[in-house]
Image: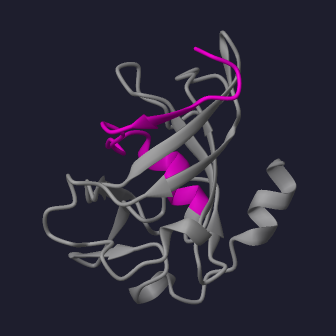
Amino acid sequence: MIPGCKYRMIDYDTYDGAVITYASCSGISNFQEFKSAHNHFDLILTALSTNELDSNVKAIHSARDVKGHFKNQDLAKWEIKYNLDNDKTKYSWAVSNGKGVIYYMKDEYNNEVPYDFKNIKFEYKGSWYYTFNGPANNVVIKPWIDNLG
């Protein structure tokens, strides 16, 4: 890598991983199952050195978003912290064959969670919901971030 250069990751995807971790992030104990919606956006990463990336990354629209899931969202306003490391001791929801971990995300509506909440869906009473929809709509997640942080 060339220090200061930006790189576009065009194959990032949130995989199904540790059910318990995502359920505890939601703040609702009876969310026991989750799945990835596999909605696609690309990441822009910046090299700090020849072997280190800045943890602050940007999201941009992806050609893989063929259904237009993010078409009307202002991805430029998102704040994302990302680590290329799939270290399960650090990120219990990481998968060994993954392409890194989003460990903080804040969208244009100031929703903020320590995972890719634009892709994770929780099962509740037979239906699937995103983090800020359905029964999780009024969950307060910020204290969870502050206490882990």
- In the visual, does 117 lie left or right of 61? right
**Residue farthest toward the left in the current orientation of the protein:** 66
Residue occupying the point 14% across, 62% down: 66
- In the visual, does 58 lie left or right of 38? right
Q: Is residue 132 above or below residue 123?
A: below
- In the visual, does 94 lie left or right of 103? left
Q: Is residue 92 above or below residue 26?
A: above
Q: How is the image coloured?
A: one colour
Q: Is residue 94 magenta?
A: no
Residue occupying the point 38% across, 27% down: 98
The quarter holding residue 143 reads bottom right
- In the visual, does 49 lie left or right of 82? right
Front residue of this view, candidates 125 and 58: 58
Residue 29 visible somewhere in the drawing: no
The number of callouts visible is: 0
- Residue 50: x %, y % from top left: 66, 10
The span picked out in magenta is 1-25
Residue occupying the point 58% across, 14% down: 1
- Residue 113: x %, y % from top left: 63, 63
Residue 110 visible somewhere in the drawing: yes
Q: Is residue 110 above or below residue 43?
A: below
Residue occupying the point 49% across, 30% down: 100
The quarter holding residue 126 reads bottom left
Q: Is residue 15 magenta?
A: yes
- Residue 132: x %, y % from top left: 49, 80
- Residue 87: x %, y % from top left: 58, 20
